[in-house]
Image: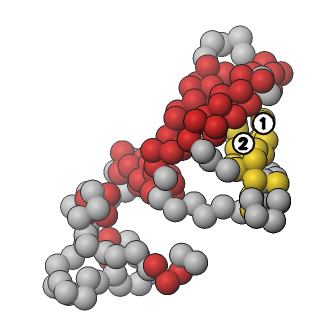
Amino acid sequence: MRTTFLPIIIFCCLLIAQTHSGSATNHQNEKNMCTDDIIDDFILQYMQQRHIPGLSASIVINNTVRWQNAYGWAHIEHHLSTTNDTLFKIASVSKTITATALMQLYEQGCFNLSDPINEYLPYPVIHPRYPTTPITFHMLLTHSSAINDNWEYLF
């Protein structure tokens, strides 16, 4: 999942960075930049190359949706098109968002990477095979805590 959508995420970040560069950029320029056909062309070409059946995408700047579109199929067999309201399983994409938020809090001095996570959570997280070993932020961020996914919730 990470490698499939990484170029799209990078493209959107570059687009947002370009939108915000320069002091003369105003709200109308941001809106025009985000609605350019370049975005559609890039996404459609990438979907074709990677055989991605459908996706929806948006660009949000300052809590305002500046651009959004849906592409392809939400369900191929039932011929259901993807819409801006189609729900997707986010899978590992949430790891990037969570890690970024954690590192921003770390930069603000809210915790140390070696701190046990149980000092910050309202419930205990304990590895059943290593109940006396505290799980740290570093362990979670480097995927070395040995916590398993709950596959029964996936489907």
Position of 27 relative to 58 (above/below): above
| Image quadrant where one finds the C terminus | bottom right
Q: Residue furthest front?
A: 77
Residue 87 in view of the camera:
yes
Q: Which secondary structure, mark 2?
A: strand
Position of 61 relative to 134 (above/below): above
Q: Which mark is residue 58?
A: 2
Q: Which mark is residue 93?
A: none
Q: Count every numbered label the image shows and give the total.
A: 2
Is the C-beta separation of discs 1 and 2 under 8 Å?
Answer: yes
Residue 119 in view of the camera:
no
Task: State which quadrant residue 139 falls in.
Answer: bottom left
Residue, disc 1: 67
At label 2, which amino acid type do we have?
Answer: Ser
Crowdedness near tag 2: few (<14), some (14–19) or many (≥20) residues, C-alpha within 10 Å: some
Q: Position of residue 41 (x, y in %)?
A: 71, 27
- Residue for point 32% across, 57% down: 141
Q: Is residue 55 left or right of residue 91?
A: right
Crowdedness near tag 1: few (<14), some (14–19) or many (≥20) residues, C-alpha within 10 Å: some
